Image: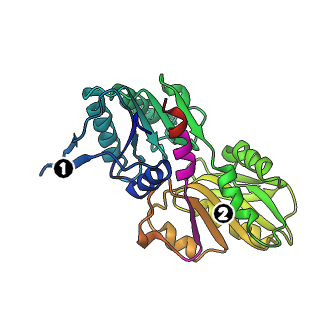
Amino acid sequence: MNTGMLFSGTSNEPLAQKVASSIGVSLGAIEITRFMDNECRVYITQAVKGKDIFVLQSLSAVADQHLVELSLMGQAAKSLGARRVTAVIPWMGYSKQDKAFRRGEAVSASLVAKFIEVAGFDRVITCELHSENVVPFFHIPVREFTTHELLGKVLASRPALEATVVSPDAGGKSRSSRFAKTVGLPIVYLEKDRDKATGKVTVTGISGDVGGRDVVIFDDIINTGATAIKTSAFLKVHGAKRIFFLATHAVLAGDAAEKLAASPIDQVVVTDTIAIPKEKRFNKLTIVSVAPLLADAISSMIK
């Protein structure tokens, strides 16, 4: 990798280190500091002129700060004469806000795409976008990776697994169907009602029988864990044995980790697109790294 360099923002340095190790390089030298008023300052301290630069940064909490940091890194690399600058964004924060649900709301995903482009990035690498609406917001190439096979390998290692994939909601139906096809498992669909005034979701039915079977719930994000917990309780009532919840992005907002630890779910499997602090780790949690996926992508893009 003599013409490419990898830099890391502050949102997910452990993942950046794994990617760097996989492709046999050290992370690029960069200083990221904050002034007394909390404004971000980025300073790339080594030559990047004529090189392919990759900047790894997840837009995780605090998403606003990490977005500005990413943008400053891209602008700094371009100002130093980088040949091409690629944003490696394992978790594309704001991707859930892909449309205006009420008059007067901003379409945040669209604006974030513009931020990234204006910062000078030439391409984007990302994982498991929440919505297919996000890619068209960009006017630069976007390469999106799925984690279906990566998470499916965890299931394959479980002994005597006779499982059915359960699609948790209508929005994730196509995503769950693709996952079920990848891992070669049957799929059933939950039926839900949502109160338009309160937003409260009630599980009302299921399209097939899960009695006596292990079940796998697959989703792209685990945020508060409320949907996963409510779904697992419903499935237990309907005779499900072990429950595995698989999600690419472990947002784990608020006290989600504590609630999941106490839930009927037997195992929660996520990736490291978002850095998970020690206080949010629990016995049922398994973390699988996306570093090999990102490393292969970066290696293939360097000429």
Picture coordinates of residue 80, whole percent (x, y): 25, 29
Q: Secondary structure at mark 1?
A: strand
- Outermost residue to the left: 36
Task: For label 2, count other residues whose C-alpha is less than 10 Å away and answer few (under 14), some (14-19) or many (20+).
Answer: many
- Looking at the image, residue 40 sits to the left or right of residue 113; the answer is left
Q: Which residue is mark 1?
A: 34
Q: Which residue is mark 2?
A: 245
Give the quadrant of the N terminus: top left
Which residue is found at the position 84% from the left and 65% from the top?
210
Q: Secondary structure at mark 2?
A: strand
Q: Which residues are magenta?
A: 283-297
Tell me if residue 112 comes above or below residue 255 in the rendering: above
Which residue is found at the position 76% from the left and 57% from the top?
166
Task: Tell me which amino acid carries mark 1.
Answer: Arg
Task: Tell me which amino acid carries mark 2.
Answer: Phe
Q: Is residue 207 magenta?
A: no
Q: Is residue 285 magenta?
A: yes
Task: For label 1, count other residues whose C-alpha is less than 10 Å away and answer few (under 14), some (14-19) or many (20+).
Answer: few
Sequence-wise, which precedes: disc 1 or disc 2?
1
Q: Is residue 83 visible?
A: yes
